[in-house]
Amino acid sequence: ADSHVEVLPIIDSTNQYLLNNIERLTTGDSCVAEFQSKARGRRGRQWFAPFGSNLYFSMYWRLDQGIAAAMGLSLVVGIVMADTLRAISGQDIKVKWPNDLYLDDQKLAGILVELAGKTGDCAHVVIGIGVNLMMTNPDPNIVNQKWANLGKVDRNLLVAKVVKNLTSKLTDFEQHGLAPFLDDWLRLDNFVDRPVKLLIGDNVIRGVAKGINEQGALILEQNGKTNTFIGGEISLRSD
Ligand code: BTN
């Protein structure tokens, strides 16, 4: 069956809206809103979602491999979004492990994947994507890092391409896993071959970023050895 895109003017959160309506959705159904009053970011953070200026998009996906595949899925979403935004804007959009898009070393977009529930081995997830397009004067209490705008784009065209590309690449991911996407990640990785620090809780880990493995873990080169990490926040370092 064909998927549907619901266009909402005002909502608490597009992710929450799909979570609330999960029983009537089929894989690939999505929604967009002009404004979100309670937009969510990762790690329990808020997301700044002013009226009309950005893209606020969510899609339901039925993950037959179960919740263990959610990490890989979210990385594929990043790759698809980077390539789609590149094609539409001509700008050098990058991915930041695990779930951000960057432009000129500044955050352009964020991805939040949430679990709606499970039936047997299969996990029902909601993929939320927020992309800064024409944002002005963000609330500094909510936006506390350097950020970028994509600029003016045709949002209808953007949503149409996002739906088409996500549906096709997530289907590839379900069949073949992350392996076919590792080169795409290297091509798009904002930090590859650059010195980074990884913050895990209070621990600071230093290394040189080398992309991701088939499980979606971050690869760091440290003293000539490669190690993998599954959590934390990376940033550039100068020391
Ligand atoms: C992050 O970088 O912390 C993730 C941000 C995700 C924001 C999007 S906007 C559309 C969708 N609905 C939400 O409530 N959050 C996501």
Image: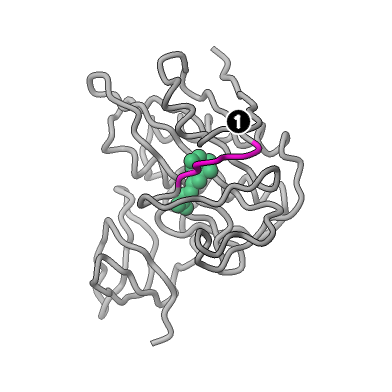
Specify whether residue 37 is painted magenta. yes
Look at the image and give the residue range highlighted in magenta: 34-40
**Residue 70 at what x, y percent from top left?**
34, 39
The reply to whether residue 129 is visible in this rendering is: no
Residue sitting farthest toward the bottom: 239
Q: Is residue 202 left or right of residue 73?
A: left
Q: Nearer the viewer, residue 81 or 131?
A: 131
The stretch drawn in magenta includes residue 148: no
Which residue is found at the position 40% from the left and 40% from the top? 113
- Tell me which amino acid carries mark 1: Lys
Q: Give the residue at mark 1.
A: 164
What residue is shown at x 52% (from left), y 29% (from top)?
167
The coloring applied to the image is one colour
Q: Judge left or right: residue 51 versus residue 42.
A: right
Q: Quadrant of the C terminus?
A: bottom left
Q: Position of residue 163 (x, y in %)?
A: 59, 31
Mark 1 CB within 8 Å of ligand 1: no
Residue 12's x, y, as percent? 52, 35
Q: Mark 1 Cα within 10 Å, few/some/many (few <14, many 20+)?
A: some
- Which corner quadrant of the image does residue 225 belong to? bottom left
Q: Is residue 164 above or below residue 196?
A: above
Q: Residue at x 54, y 12 (%)?
A: 1
Q: Is residue 15 above or below residue 77?
A: above
Left or right, residue 220 beside residue 105: left
Please name whichever residue, 181 or 238, is drawn nearer the observer in this view of the structure.
Answer: 238
- Judge whether 174 appears above or below 132 on screen: above
